[in-house]
Amino acid sequence: MDYKRILQIKYLEKTYGRGKSSFTAIDEMSFDVLDSEFFAIMGTSGSGKTTLLNMLAGVTKATNGEIIFDGKDINSFSRKELENYRGNLVTYIFQDFKLIDNISSLENVLIPFKIHSKKWDMNKIYRLARRMDIFELLNKYPKDLSGGQKQKVAALRAIAIEPKIILADEPTGALDSKSSIDLLKILKDINKVENTTIIMVTHDSYAASFADRIMFIKDGKLINELMIGDNENQKDYYNRINKANK
Ligand code: ADP
Ligand code: MG
């Protein structure tokens, strides 16, 4: 693994609202994400996971603190830099897929390329789709797909543009266990083969056991961290995560 930092988060804070009714969802959080790592963020509902991910994605503005990408705080990006960061350098997989229903799966996958005026390599997209076992689905409409199939299409959309970082917010939350395992294996494969950094939010210990490192958060604060051991198998790692998660 490469120990270069891809993101440096410093004293990050997000407070919703003002005055008496204000609420601090992320409270002076500092951590690094390494280039090419599979990083998971765990925490119960309401702990601030989505707020944090949205700030990392550049879609929610931080109240205070820094998110340093490639030497520069994303909060000080120009409009152009931010456009390039969102959806090209950093892509997002959502729990509810967020596919457009009345265009084909392939057209969904091509949307980010069109938004960012980027050329696509159809052979590469076909190759990825075959590896993810969704080649036959490319001409189908999302409304005709199962949840697991939709999430694979959404994953292909996030992967195809070759981002530096893929953010995933409870990507297996709406899937059955077989589809969840399929998706987690796809993310792991992309992480290993393409060296794409993955930041995945989950409250599921099994999903987290696919990550190299796990950060636990509670009430918007970092409370614990776990890392897979050098020779540790996934089962033992899972048991440790499960224990830490209680
Ligand atoms: P998680 O994804 O871990 O469930 P969220 O980041 O969605 O947590 O929410 C963290 C906290 O911030 C929750 O208490 C939630 O109610 C609050 N929150 C989230 N979004 C907003 C918002 N737009 N306005 C006010 N409070 C919010
Ligand atoms: Mg959430």
Image (cartoon, grey):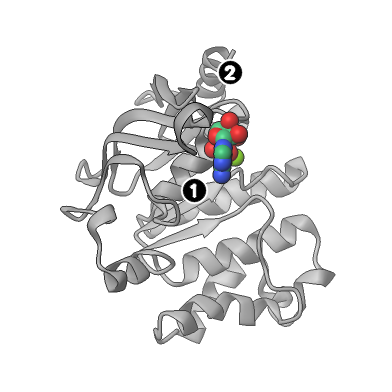
Amino acid on which the number 1 mark rests in the picture: Lys
Residue 69 screen position, x and y as percent = 24, 53
Horizontal arrangement in the rendering, residue 71 relative to residue 151 (left or right): left
Horizontal arrangement in the rendering, residue 116 relative to residue 97 (left or right): left
Using the image, determine if residue 11 lies above or below residue 145.
Answer: above
The crowd level at tag 1 (other Cα within 10 Å; few <14, some 14-19, many 20+) is many
**Numbered tag placed on residue 19 in the rendering:** none
Residue at the (66%, 63%) spot, across then down: 98
Can you tell which of label 1 and label 2 is closer to the viewer? 2
Displayed quadrant of residue 90: bottom left
Q: Quadrant of the C terminus?
A: top right
The crowd level at tag 2 (other Cα within 10 Å; few <14, some 14-19, many 20+) is some
Residue 166 screen position, x and y as percent = 44, 55
Closest to the observer, 50 or 6: 50
Residue 170 screen position, x and y as percent = 61, 43
Whereabouts is ligand 2, in terms of quadrant? top right
Q: Is residue 120 in view from this perspective?
A: yes
Q: Quadrant of the N terminus?
A: top left
Closest to the observer, 133 or 20: 20
Tell me the element at label 1.
helix
Horizontal arrangement in the rendering, residue 83 relative to residue 121 (left or right): left
The residue singled out by tag 1 in the image is 188
Residue at the (41%, 48%) spot, across then down: 55
Residue at the (20%, 56%) spot, across then down: 70
Amino acid on which the number 2 mark rests in the picture: Asn
Using the image, determine if residue 100 lies above or below residue 26.
Answer: below
User: Label 1 vs label 2: CA separation?
Assistant: 20 Å
